Amino acid sequence: MSRPVIIAIDGTFASGKGTLAGKLADHYGFDHLDTGRLYRAVAQTVLTRGGDPDDAATATGAARTLDIALLDDPVLKSGPVGAAASRVAMHIPVRQALRDFQRDFATDTARKGAVLDGRDIGTVICPDADVKLYIDAKPEQRAQRRYAELTGYGEDITYESVLTQLRERDHRDSTRAVAPLKPAKDAHLIDTTGLSVDGVFGQAVRLVDAIMSGSRARRKPPGTGMRSTPDS
Ligand code: DC
């Protein structure tokens, strides 16, 4: 049995990639995995135990024994857990411990399709994904979105501190030695600056439809009505 269709979405913090991933999954009837939640769950486990996210052994221990039920805990969305997630994500054994879970999710033949969003999906986790998207937006706009989200959860923060933390996070995620945040060579870039959620979704659906109909056409056997060679 062939593996499901895989849509890999990478991008910067608060670029809108998670919202887009959820909407695409709903639209196509695919399953969605927000891989940032895995790193956040590891971070939360370390913090709950009073550990240091920069300590590789502690973070690795938490990743290897991760309780998947934690993935639904609303505390994972908080600012401090996100910052700690970016730190535990720097340790190679932590990434290795989470890799198989992500790949198994993407290739589970019981699914019609899988949408995974994160930082290294198109480059490391699913390098042969059918569609790769890379989502970004200007830091000021991402900080504005994140500020609105965090104050909505009741966090007491300023826009300036969100912007500073966002720049630190971008720097850490994109300069780390292992699986740094970067677009895959064959990723399609979408800049969400100034775009509404529906505007981004519409752009992504047009891209995904075009790519999927192209790959279906390539897979169709000869004699089924598709020309296999162009008119000469
Ligand atoms: O997408 P997010 O903000 O929930 O991710 C939290 C942190 O987890 C992010 O700063 C870096 C790390 N992460 C990662 O290294 N690789 C992924 N595929 C997803 C997240």
Image: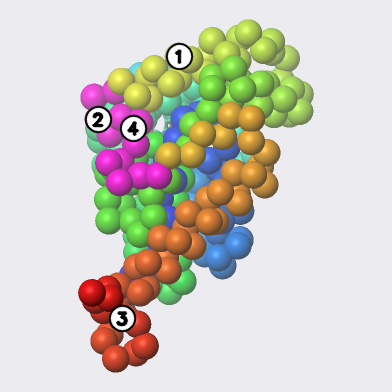
Q: Which mark is residue 182?
A: 4
Q: Amino acid at mark 3?
A: Arg
* Horizontal and vertical percent position of residue 96: 26, 42
Q: Is residue 72 above or below residue 6?
A: above
> Residue at image x 64%, y 36%?
195
Nearest the viewer among 205 and 227 is: 227
Q: Is residue 75 visible?
A: no
* Mark toward the start of the polypeptide (2 vs 3): 2
- Mark 2 lies on residue: 178
* Mark toward the start of the polypeptide (3 vs 1): 1
Q: Amino acid at mark 4?
A: Lys
Question: In the image, is residue 128 part of the stretch drawn in magenta?
Answer: no
Where is residue 74, by image quadrant? Answer: top right
The response on whether ligand 1 sits within 8 Å of label 2 is no
Q: Amino acid at mark 1?
A: Glu
- Mark 3 lies on residue: 227
How many marks overall? Answer: 4
Q: Mark 2 to mark 3: distance in Å?
A: 44 Å
Query: Helix or strand or loop: what does disc 1 sit on?
Result: helix
Q: Mark 2 to mark 4: distance in Å?
A: 11 Å
Quarter of the figure with the N terminus: bottom left
Q: Residues within 10 Å of mark 3 (few under 14, many from 20)?
A: few
Where is residue 75, by image quadrant? Answer: top right
Image-based side of 11 in relation to 145, left or right: left
- Mark 1 lies on residue: 168
Q: Are marks 1 and 4 in contact (CB under 8 Å)?
A: no
Query: Helix or strand or loop: what does disc 4 sit on?
Result: loop
Q: Is residue 157 visible?
A: yes
Q: Is residue 111 above or below residue 23?
A: below
Q: Mark 1 to mark 2: distance in Å?
A: 17 Å
> Residue at image x 40%, y 44%?
188
